[in-house]
Amino acid sequence: MNEKLLQYLWNFKIFKNFDFKDVEGNPVEILDFGTWNFNSGPDFLCGKIKTKDLVLAGNIELHVKSSDYIFHQHSGNPEFENLILHAVYIHDVEVEELHQKNIHTLVLKDYIDEKLLWKYEALLKENQFIPCEALISPEKIPFYFAEETLLKKLDEKSTEIEEALKINKNNYEAVLFQNLAYAFGLKVNAPIFRQMAENIDFSVINKIRQNPLQLEALFFGMCGWLENAEDEQIKIWKREFDFLKSKYALSDLRSFPKFSRLRPPNFPTIRLSQLASLYHLNQNLFSKLISAKSKKEIDDVFQPVKASEYWNSRFNFGKTSSVTGEKFLTEDFKNIILLNAVLPLKYTYHKHFHEGITDEILEFYQKIPSEKNTVIDGWKNLNMKIENALESQAILYHYKTFCEKKNCLNCGIGFQLLKAESDNIK
């Protein structure tokens, strides 16, 4: 037993019966279990009980053991002045302060079915893909689960974007650049690319975007790659970067992208060259992406983007490759950019004054294929239907937020599973 589970059982009234009696044998009728409080103070606010023909209104505190009231230093805390009930799983000590104030202590152990405890403990102990793997099935997934979960993720992402906007003086173009850099970096280099982008004043991008050579030189130089010129092209990039550094007083901070654990097409050299191409080809990139009404309109923006000619025969500086050809963005990569950079910003930009943006964004997600990774495969092995990015993004967020952390009591699916058990008890 832990306190979180005890609060869960109290909130959802999951008990074998409600013929409660306090430690002195007095009947206690719970007229109102109170409102679950997730902030400081008692666990449940504005409860109401009836005992000894008296109706008492106030707050209710729950603990695994009575002594936890002392251990948690509630004694003397003014937030606990209006307490009417102390509900515990085990009564191991008389709390003098509560006794003097005539605050009743209710022991819940005998009112809780042990099968429910075993089930919860089994969820936490199982070393499987997800804790409820043996219990879950597609029909246990709540209605509109994907839509509601994805919107939670978008709201969380939107909060991060709004913080970035404050830092960038409400410059959406600068934040888009930082988000795109993050997406182009993929999992390995995402934070490094973002750091590089944050170290560049976006006004510099605007001033040089008509010159793809300078854009590449800027990105490569900010990554510290141009110090040792191995061929003529690198010397040209270095010369351009030195000029830009002097003219625009560029930051001396350098980011150092990683090459390990990456396939050559995803090398940071290729991705930064493609990012430079994107900004060179689109003088009003932010406007195009924010105003786009269909996935095709966004796809058209990214369709011509490719690494510069130098990279047709290379993946790294100075080293030619037997694999040659122009390096365009793949469909899968374009979808990653859309999911991780474009749609969250589009949602944030429109959500306060465009009533239909939620449905519009969800429609975008529905038209993007599901990602392919081990987490999605794990859910599909449990017979879950995951056909588009709306469903895959929702399940990935849910897995990260609840399943990995074994946060089953706050999980909508876990709630349904435990509720089913409580219904059996009743």
Image (cartoon, helix red, strand yellow):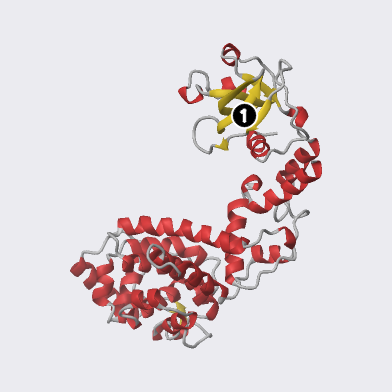
Residue that label 1 marks: 62
Q: Position of residue 280 (x, y in %)?
A: 33, 80
Say which of 259 and 283 sits in front. Answer: 283
For the N terminus, the image quarter is top right
For the C terminus, the image quarter is top right
* Element under disc 1: strand
Residue 153 shows up from this direction: yes
- When the figure is inspected, residue 323 is found, relative to residue 38, above or below; the finding is below
- When the figure is inspected, residue 265 is found, relative to residue 1, above or below; the finding is below
Q: Residue sitting at 65 percent across and 73 percent down?
A: 387
In the visual, does 153 lie left or right of 228?
right
* Residue 342 found in image quarter: bottom left
Q: Amino acid at mark 1?
A: Leu
Q: Position of residue 238 (x, y in %)?
A: 29, 74
Say which of 400 and 60 sits in front. Answer: 60
Q: Position of residue 277 (x, y in %)?
A: 37, 80
Q: Residue sitting at 38 percent across and 62 percent down?
A: 352
Q: Position of residue 294 (x, y in %)?
A: 47, 80
- When the figure is inspected, residue 29 is found, relative to residue 154, above or below; the finding is above
In the visual, does 157 lie left or right of 420?
left
